[in-house]
Amino acid sequence: MNAETGKVIKLTILYILNRVDAPISNSQITNYMLENDFTDYFTIQQLMGELIDDGFVWSKTVRNRTFYSLSDSGKESFYALSSELSQKIRDDADEYIKKNAMKIREESDVGSTYVETSLGTYNVNLFIDEAGERIFEIGMIVPDKEKAQRMCSSWQKKSEELYPLVMEKLLTKK
């Protein structure tokens, strides 16, 4: 890979991070880059690592999933070099973001954790954040780690269905 190709890939990553309003997962960025034949998986990870090391991108790992967001210096650098990114790449990235907006948002805004208690049970915490603020949170105790893991996994998949149901049940005057 030549330096110019690496620069375009990095600018594309910065563009995507600049366009989304929440942290975006490594898998979302990687999928976009692979679907559009920018390069291979390992090169994407290498270039993302360079962006993090240079302070342009922040990373946060939650339960083995890494999310990225643009730092202030990343924004400044992107704006300084944005004219070097073609309109076609911008349009393709915008289309991907639009097409996958719900999935991107769900991945970053829906979360869960579990912690073993002193009694050997597990405290499970399920939550939804919106615009950086926690709007819903529920906690419960389950008897074992397998159930805690299953609840966290199910929450990721079913929160869109469960959240409105819980709110409706709690707000109904019956």
Image: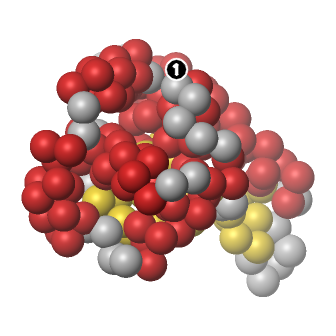
- Coordinates of residue 123 in the picture (x, y in percent): 68, 64
Q: Which residue is mark 1?
A: 161
| Label 1 element class | helix
User: Residue 130's quadrant in the figure?
Assistant: top left
Is residue 139 toward the left or the right of residue 85 in the image?
Answer: right
Identify whether 66 is placed above or below 24.
below
Residue appearing at x 85%, y 60% in the figure: 145
Quadrant for the C terminus in the image: top left
Return the residue found at the far front.
Answer: 2
Q: Position of residue 127 (x, y in %)?
A: 47, 49
- The residue shown at (53%, 68%) is 49
- Residue at 67% from the left image edge and 46% from the top image edge: 41
Residue drawn at (51%, 47%), measured in percent from left and top?
Answer: 25
Residue 162 seen in render: no
| 21, 82: nearer the viewer | 82
Percent position of residue 46, x then y: 59, 63
Q: Decide if residue 93 is on the left or right side of residue 127.
A: left
The amino acid type found where label 1 is placed reads Glu
Q: Can residue 52 be seen by looking at this rendering?
A: yes
The image shows residue 61, relative to residue 105, as above or below, that is: below
